[in-house]
Amino acid sequence: MLKLALKNLFAHPVRTVLTFGSLVVATFLVCFLASLVTALEAGVSGNEVRRLWTQTAVSLFSSMPQSYQSKIESLPEVQAISKFQWFGGYYKEQKNFFSQFAVDPEPFLELYPEVDLANDANGDPLGSFQDFVADRRGCIVGKAVFDKYAEKEGWEVGGTLPIIGTIFPGKDGAAWEFVISAVFDAEEANVDKNNIFFHWDYFEETLKDVRGEVPEVGTFVFEPAEGADLDAVCASVDALFAGGPMRTQTTTESEFQRQFVGMIGNLPRFIAFLGFGVFVAIVLACVNTMLMAAREQTHDVGVLKALGFSDGRVFGLMLTQGMLLCGVGGGLGLLIAKASEAGFRKSIQIYFPGYQIANETLVGAAIAIVLVGLVSGAVPAFNARRMSPVEALRATV
Amino acid sequence: MLVPINYSFRSLFVRRSATLLTVFGIAATVAVLAGVLALQQGFVTLFSGSGREDVVVFLRPGANAEGESQFARDKAQIVVKGTPEIALDDEGRPMASMESYLAVRLERIGGGETNVPVRGVEPMSYAVQGDHVRLVDGRWPQPGADEVAVGAKLVDRILNCRMGDVVQLNLSPMRVVGVFESDGPYASEIWGDNDRILEALERPNPNRVIARVAPGTDVAALAERLKSDPQAPAKVQTEREYLTNQTGALSSFLLFLGSFMALVMGTAAVFTATNTMLSAVSARTHEIGILLSVGYRPGPIFLAFLLEALVLGLLGGVAGCLLVLPVNGIETGTTNFNTFTEIGFAFRITPVVLTSAVTFSLVLGLLGGAWPAWRASRMKPTEALRRR
């Protein structure tokens, strides 16, 4: 039976290959789009992190006075705390954009145990975190951004890294000069490997020198004591600043990421809608091919029935053809999607840093393929089943 | 001699179920492309289509957006006083104002937070904008008062943005006293008195200076002069230039998404079209034999089948355009990646969208039809006639 199905499929090899091709392409596209949506929501479903973030409740772009730090530290539940400020610079040209943050190095490393030292191709560590803590101009560079520019621009550990500040221009508009102390990597998706972290002290000193200004703090990241009630800690931090000058909003890191994704608005919905359009188009294409193939097999179906094949077996034969085509084509599409994952992650990381084909996506797509196979096999199969052998034999295509 | 055009049309009609399914396949592809393009067009026209050529924006050198820019008051005064190109109003005052800008976290109606641009303006700001910003309800905020006017696109989207509501900015409650309309992104902003907004949001400095320039001003020369001004250097752009520059990231993302989808789905659609045409050719082998034996040359037969494929593509293109037409004008809101604020805009099915969609569908038909048509024209009359 399987043999017969295969023979039938390859009666018109070109056509089968073409259908097969569109299935591969469409499956790949559905996976790709689904992964974009997943990437937009990455971190949302990530493992809950106990770290708390205090930011202003007013705007993502406003900051708090440094004096907030000692008030937060005065709460008994608060342990390690680091200041964060978004630097918003770029390397050489504006298109070389990635995120840089000023942080307090020691508490930062303590707060982010998942930040690991990266290794080079030989397995040797790239720099050291001690160097980062010791060197005021030191910075640690995410592996993704380091790999990108190590090839193109020759970045290396120990080398100087000039960054042009858009919000905080250097002296006379010149670039800020950092030293690459180490390269970091992380297993978890919640640490972005496109970021760069550098010393708060260097940031503050330079800013005082250039503008005579003390920098404000974008985010305070801290860890509550073991066993502390997170909601209660958040509430007591925010209560400290309810009277201003800047109201604050303290949340867990995961909760903030959820809010942040919510702010992107309906882009994920829009992409999901496109994915659905693609899916409809595949179903149509497959049903079309199967119908065309079935019509040409009308005569063959007559022969089979005249030979004594039961209606059920003829039905099964047609269904098998549909399933075979979809199963193999779709499977290949899934493989391509998975194989191209790394390449895409590199090329679209500015927009979708967490691009990754999740297992759920693969399973979902596989189920969809089987459904398409069932539909595109069943429609002609029903027709074939109903046909009387005499009519089928008489039919001219 | 050419094969009658009717032949191509009729054969599409005879095989209508296959034709219909193929047309739908192409239509879906075209509709996806057109939908993404319509979104991109709506977004871009909102910005670049609305900026004024006679209004210039002064930013801190090096800043690319208002959010990054800071303009201290004394520097702003120097710029306004020291720039003779700025137009004067009826009372002889320079038509220029300082504005502050911050994306503020506010709650959406229906839950969730989003980033709404809040702009501190001076009374002269309204004159600078002229009829590009129109009050549709109530009045403008009084200078020095805790009052705001909201853009019309916010009224139904953001909590507490109806007339008479009170919207909280940091610690200051601000009363909504007016609603204004604009063809540009301003319609998604909240406007209040500059001094009060700066104070409420704890901002030290305004973000930009905006001014109307006298007719015939050479903005490029002005920009060149102020770039290296020793006292108050500034980056000068026309408002249109400035707004166009704010669309780069989202626009290129949408174009990338659109062309990528078109490429991949187009490949699948070409495969389907080729399939349909191959099946059409093989079903009509006998007919082709007759055509050849009555003296039609392979060339015209090739053209007849190619025409059939082109019509198939065109039908798909038209159907695809019809499918997306209903989205025209639908209001949506998406975050502008450049400013990270939510901007309300509508899908726009512009002529550009329609032409690209139809051209694309014809290309699909052409690519899908070429090979089957070539196969049809290469048949040997005797063999073709022998087939049933």
Image (cartoon, coloured by chain):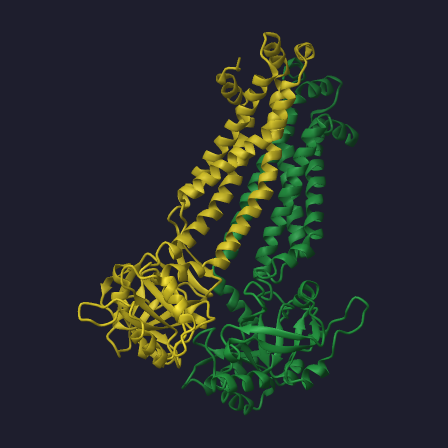
Q: In this rendering, is residue B13 above or below A22?
A: above
Give percent across and percent down for residue B271. Answer: 62, 34
Quarter of the figure with the N terminus of chain A:
top right
Give the drawing colour for chain A: green
Quadrant in the picture for residue A382: top right
Res A47 quadrant in image = bottom right
Residue B3 shown left or right of residue A243 in the figure: right
Tell which residue pokes out farthest to the top in this image: B294
The answer to whether B352 is drawn above or below residue B20 in the figure is below
In the rendered view, does B7 fall on the left or right side of A141?
left
Q: Nearer the viewer, residue B183 or B334?
A: B183
**Residue A222: percent from the left, percent from the top?**
59, 82
In the image, which lettered chain appears yellow? B
Confirm whether residue A189 shows in the render. yes
Where is A223 relative to B128, above or below? below
| Residue B45: image location, x then y, percent | 39, 52
Quarter the C terminus of chain A occupies: top right
Q: Is residue B194 left or right of residue B367?
A: left
In the rendered image, residue B148, in percent from the top left (x then y), is placed at 29, 71
Residue occupying the point 70% across, 63% down: A151
Report if residue A49 is visible in the image: no
